[in-house]
Image (cartoon, rainbow, N blue to C red):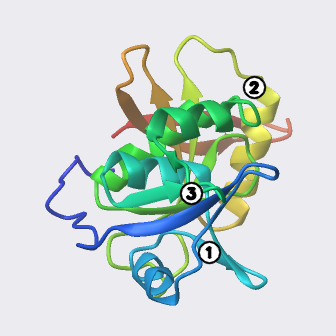
Amino acid sequence: MSSPDTAIDIEFPYIVEALLVEKNLKVLVKDIGFQDQLRNKGFGEKQDSEYILQTYEALYLIHTNRLVLNTKKLKRVDFESLFNITLRHDREILTKFLIYRDLRSRGYVAKEGFGFGVDFRVYERGEFEKKPAKYVVFGINEGIQVEATDFSEALDQIIKMGKNAVVAVIERRGEITYYKVSKVRFANNKMHPKSLTQTSEE
C-alpha cells in the first residue's frame, strides 16, 4: 500500500460536533450539514434514523482537531476520555485506532470490516462510493500468536469476495508494516492440492 502522504488526505475544513451516548457507546452526529461533510469524506454511516461514527473514527477526528464531542450533559469528551471509555467495551480499540489513523494518513477511506477480528474494508483512492472496497486489511500485533487455521479461513473468505487481503503488523513502537497475502496451490502426483500462504511486504 502507498506511503503516508498527508497532502492527499485533506479533511474538511470544518469542526464537526457530535454526541456521546455512553450507555450503548454511540457517537451520534445530529446536524444534517455535519452528516453531509462526514459522508463526503467517508466518515460514519446512517443506521436507521441515526448517523453514527465508529469510535475509532471519532478518536481519529478528535486527534486531528476536527471533532468536538460532548455528553448529553454538555461535558466535553477529549481523546483520552473517549479512549478509556471505549477500552471498557473493546480491548482492541488501540489496534483499530493505530491502523485506521495510518490508513487515513495514506489517503485511504477505511470502513468497518467483515468480522475477521480487527479488520477494515479499504477503498482505493478516489473510489469510495464509486467502486467496492479493493482491500480487506486486518491487524496483528507483533508478538501475538495467531491460529493458522483461523488465518487461513479468513484468507479464503476474503479471496472468495474478490478482494485483496492485506495484513497490518503493528510493531511494539506503534509503526505499521503492510503485507499482501495470497495463497499458492500445488498438486503432488495424486495427492489433493495443498495450499501455502505467501506474503509480500508493502
Asked if residue 188 can be seen in this view, the reply is no
Marks 3/2: CA distance? 47 Å
The image's mark for residue 148 is: 2
Q: Which mark is residue 74?
A: 3
In the figure, residue 13 lies in which quadrant? bottom left
- Looking at the picture, tell me which residue is in the foreground, 114 or 157: 114
Q: Residue 128: image x %, image y %?
A: 44, 78
Where 72 falls versus 142 (above or below)?
A: below
Q: Amino acid at mark 1?
A: Glu
Q: Nearer the viewer, mark 3 or mark 2?
A: 3
What residue does disc 1 label?
45
Neighbor class of circle 3 (other Cα within 10 Å; few <14, some 14-19, many 20+) is few
Spatial distance from mark 2 to mark 1, Cα to Cα?
33 Å
Asked if 53 appears above or below 141 in the picture, the reply is below
The structure residue drawn at horizontal position 29% and vertical position 61%, both measured from the top left corner, is 107
Question: Nearer the viewer's eye, disc 3 or disc 1?
Answer: 3
Q: Residue at x 58, y 54 (%)?
A: 120
